[in-house]
Image (spheres, rainbow, N blue to C red):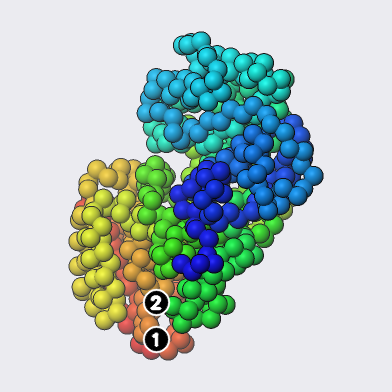
Amino acid sequence: MSSQQKKLPIGIQSFEKLINEGAVYVDKTKYIYELLKLGFGAYFLSRPRRFGKSLLVSTLEAIFKNKRSLFKGLWLDSSEYAWKEFPVIKFDMSTVAQKTDIELIVGLKDAVKDNAKNEQIALEESDSPGRMFQSLIHALVKKYGEKVVVLIDEYDDPIIKHVTRPEMAARNREVLHDFYKVMKAEDANLRFVFLTGISKFVKTSIFSGLNNLENISLLTEYSPLLGYTQDELESYFREYISDFAETQSLTVSAALEEIKLWYNGYRFSESEIKVYNPFSSLLFFKHQKFTNYWFETGTPSYLVDLIKKKLPEIEDFENGIRVLQRSFESYEIESLSIIPLLYDTGYLTIKSSSTHNMMQDYILAYPNLEVKNAMLDSLLLGFSEAPMEKIDSIILSISDAISTSNLEKFFSILKSYFASIPYDLIPEKKLNEKYFQLIFYLLMRVSSFRVNTEDRTNLGRIDLVLESDTSVYLFELKVNSSAQAALEQIKEKKYYEKYLNIQKEVLIIGVNFSLEERNVTDWVVESLGL
């Protein structure tokens, strides 16, 4: 790191600590001012994990506690904002004990007591964390003679951590309902309320209780509030980008294109404003190499479990899945929709939007290469529960087999992988052509070949097309039928015709899976030549 480079704020979620340590702060105070200038209000912002929500909440806390000296040189310091101290209550729900509803009640009481202790306020103990929250609001109004600011980070964490256990999630939701409804009762004593989270869960009392709560998650003016825009990345991290370009013998322009491919692409509104994942970007600048930094912190197991349970059209995540805006409006634990949840958690993002018949719709897809690659790896691991080293060995073996056109070896490896999947991992009712096609697709996709699924022709859709440097493989998959029947479908529908003039060997392959054996039973291949 050169003497001109500021410290990277990796893992720093406190605004005050970040400023005092002289770390890079990408100035977002102009967007924050857009909220503050409205005066009284209550706002909700949904963003993926590790996207800077906690730092934003900490920045708001510093503003309302009138720590103006920390903002020297930032946009807000020279704005028309009227600096003044207000009492602040801050909760980070991701740090509150929440394994059970009983534990959550105790954790909420402790969180209220921590806030009271910071203000040197003695609170009377109560069985209800809500009543203690209410008492703290009253005590702060009395102490400061001002209305109270409430900041709640990751408001839905006690719910979302249990989405694969609906009964526990519902019990935690009820506890939060009783806690959050205090803000409705105390509306007259609250000046500003700001909440972050992953999703908009109904029945928590927040969205029904706070009549003036505005969801700013999809508003254009706040789409750059978290994450780094292209201009911000190039301005604040100029020296780090130059260092990377120099070590890789790249032009700065070429280096930026690579960085964009890996970590940019998140879009949170109808506008085409895109932002970089801040967590991955910072670690990239630290280590000066491309890898899946965001996923190395751990893909939430509940997402993999939900995908295994619901089996969405994962193959379409690359090209895009169309959803209506109302899909993001609210969530029910009892009937959770996986696609909007994948958007909220950052695994899919908005690629385009349009309006039809007065209805807003969005096309969702992977935001970038980091997410796509790591998501496929996580799912492949999740569907087999095999050790990573075994998965890696299978992937390398498949790559070698396809590169050398050794289909005997290829199907031997494929059968070995299916045999490694625990019998009880996939419920009987989920065993169908879609399941086998999904596993087949995941194996091919992570093997670094060009893969198309359900490739359209004028007569139908091919199940999967795999393209190497020398060959094109057209696969048709059948379940409880025969490989020959699958091959005959390729011939009958002439799926191969669009590939006959690309100067590569074209091979058509029929594959049959058995539900009883949960594996490939036979396969047949024909070469159509170049």
Q: Mark 1 highlights which residue? A: 504
Q: Nearer the viewer, residue 517 or 466?
A: 466
Query: Percent position (x, y) of residue 418?
Result: 24, 57
**Residue at horizontal 37 percent and vertical 55 percent from the top:** 296
Residue 383 sits above or below residue 127 on the image: below
**Residue at horizontal 46 percent and vertical 86 percent from the top:** 502
Q: Are marks 2 and 1 in contact (CB under 8 Å)?
A: yes
Toward which corner of the image does residue 230 lie, by quadrant? bottom right
Q: Callout 2, which amino acid?
A: Glu
Q: Mark 2 highlights which residue? A: 467
Q: Callout 1, which amino acid?
A: Lys
Query: Percent position (x, y) of residue 310?
Result: 42, 45
Q: Secondary structure at mark 2?
A: strand
Query: Percent position (x, y) of residue 522?
Result: 23, 65
Relative side of 374 to 526, left or right: right
**Residue at horizontal 58 percent and vertical 27 percent from the top:** 89
Q: Nearer the viewer, residue 5 or 451?
A: 5
Q: Residue furthest right?
A: 80
Tell me how far mark 2 sits from mark 1, CA to CA.
Answer: 9 Å
